[in-house]
């Protein structure tokens, strides 16, 4: 079983602390047998949550040395993220990394991870309001303030609060595949539509019922993936001009209509590769790529592997699990 250790430091943000348990716990209910065990780790096995966000005292069975026994460590933000971090915490994170543990931060948890030196020479992100400070404190890190999360292999970082949900769903997708990730997203009533490269600063969606809300259009696009949709087709369905449609997509989804369509087609192709024995050419048509050559181009560009290699790797992972 994959052990996820959530590092809780004094002043931890309660919502960020509970995101991993929610996502990985729901993922467990979508698999034949539980895939994850989530452990809350705290120095001295006790931590006090941020008092300005509903503070409480948390006692746990897991201490810092237990980080090295995990497969994944999640580092949420905490109130004193800008202060010097306890050396015992940094030492424990370095030891976990040396063992090959995957480590991910949520929001300003990136400051704790950055203090270890493990992000030096890598791309990383954090909440856009604190990105400049992170870059100034750690000039060897390439800080990108615009994206939702960055997957740099062993180390991952994410933007503010809710982006932790996107990050954890991304980890489920890496571990268990696109189909289980989609089921998990539905289980927590969250659309699996935000890619890591999407913009951080997205205006809140207009309430459902307003004619400008895009959810019906997103559903229509997803149900018509196999058809050659143009920007004009999408605008016509939404009853908007192309210019207005593009503006609403940026505000509500954080990307363009055609980029969202492309990402959704790749995700659908992944699900078909994982869950069916359909030929690659058939999957290409069903996902809206017309030919296997086009599918292969976009698949390789986004995922760094071919559809055939992806299917083989996923099947091998299923057999070994």
Image (tube, rainbow, N blue to C red):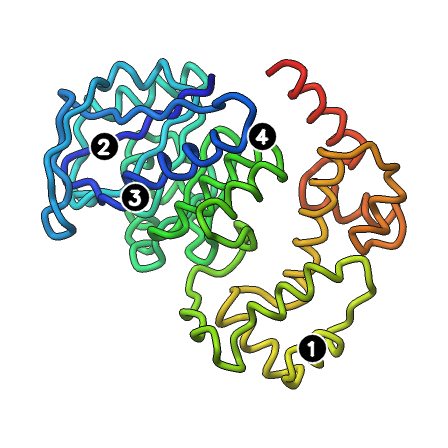
Name the residue: 33% across, 37% down: 114
For the residues labelled 1 and 3, the Cα–Cα distance comes to: 37 Å
Mark with earlier residue (3, 2): 2
Dot 3 or dot 4, earlier in sequence: 3
Residue 25: x and y in percent read 41, 32
Kindly state the secondary structure of the residue where label 3 is placed.
helix
* Residue 58 place in picture, x, y as percent: 15, 31
Q: Are marks 2 and 4 in contact (CB under 8 Å)?
A: no
For disc 4, the marked residue is: 176
Q: According to the image, label 3 marks what residue?
A: 16
- Residue that numbered label 1 is attached to: 237
Mark 3–mark 2 distance (CA, rounded to whole Å): 10 Å
Q: For the residue carrying disc 1, how many other residues have a C-alpha within 10 Å: few (<14), some (14-19), or many (20+)?
A: few
Q: Residues within 10 Å of mark 2 (few under 14, many from 20)?
A: many
Q: Circle 2 — which element?
A: loop
Q: Residues within 10 Å of mark 4 (few under 14, many from 20)?
A: some
């Amino acid at each position: 079983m994959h052990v996820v250790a959530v590092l809780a430091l004094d002043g931890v943000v309660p919502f960020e602390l509970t995101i991993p348990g929610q996502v990985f716990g729901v993922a467990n209910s979508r698999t034949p047998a539980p895939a994850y065990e989530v452990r809350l780790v705290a120095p001295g096995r006790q931590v006090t949550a941020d008092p300005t966000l509903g503070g409480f005292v948390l006692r746990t069975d897991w201490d810092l040395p237990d980080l090295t026994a995990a497969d994944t460590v999640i580092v949420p933000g905490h109130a004193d993220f800008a202060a010097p971090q306890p050396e015992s915490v940094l030492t424990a994170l370095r030891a976990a990394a040396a063992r090959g543990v995957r480590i991910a931060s949520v929001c300003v948890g990136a400051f704790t991870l950055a203090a270890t030196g493990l992000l030096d020479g890598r791309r990383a992100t954090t909440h856009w309001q604190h990105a400049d400070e992170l870059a100034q404190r750690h000039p060897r890190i390439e800080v990108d303030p615009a994206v939702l999360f960055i997957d740099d292999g062993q180390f991952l970082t994410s933007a503010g609060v809710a982006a932790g949900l996107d990050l954890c769903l991304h980890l489920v997708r890496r571990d268990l595949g696109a189909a289980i990730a989609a089921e998990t997203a539905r289980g927590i009533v969250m659309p699996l539509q935000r890619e890591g490269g999407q913009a951080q600063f997205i205006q809140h969606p207009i309430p459902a019922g307003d004619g400008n809300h895009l959810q019906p259009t997103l559903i229509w696009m997803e149900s018509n993936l196999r058809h050659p949709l143009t920007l004009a087709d999408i605008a016509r369905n939404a009853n908007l001009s192309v210019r207005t449609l593009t503006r609403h997509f940026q505000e509500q989804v954080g990307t363009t209509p055609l980029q969202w369509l492309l990402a959704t087609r790749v995700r659908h192709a992944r699900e078909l590769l994982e869950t069916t024995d359909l030929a690659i050419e058939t999957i290409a048509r069903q996902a809206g790529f017309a030919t296997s050559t086009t599918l292969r181009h976009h698949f390789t560009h986004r995922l760094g592997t071919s559809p055939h290699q992806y299917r083989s790797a996923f099947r091998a992972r299923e057999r070994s699990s």
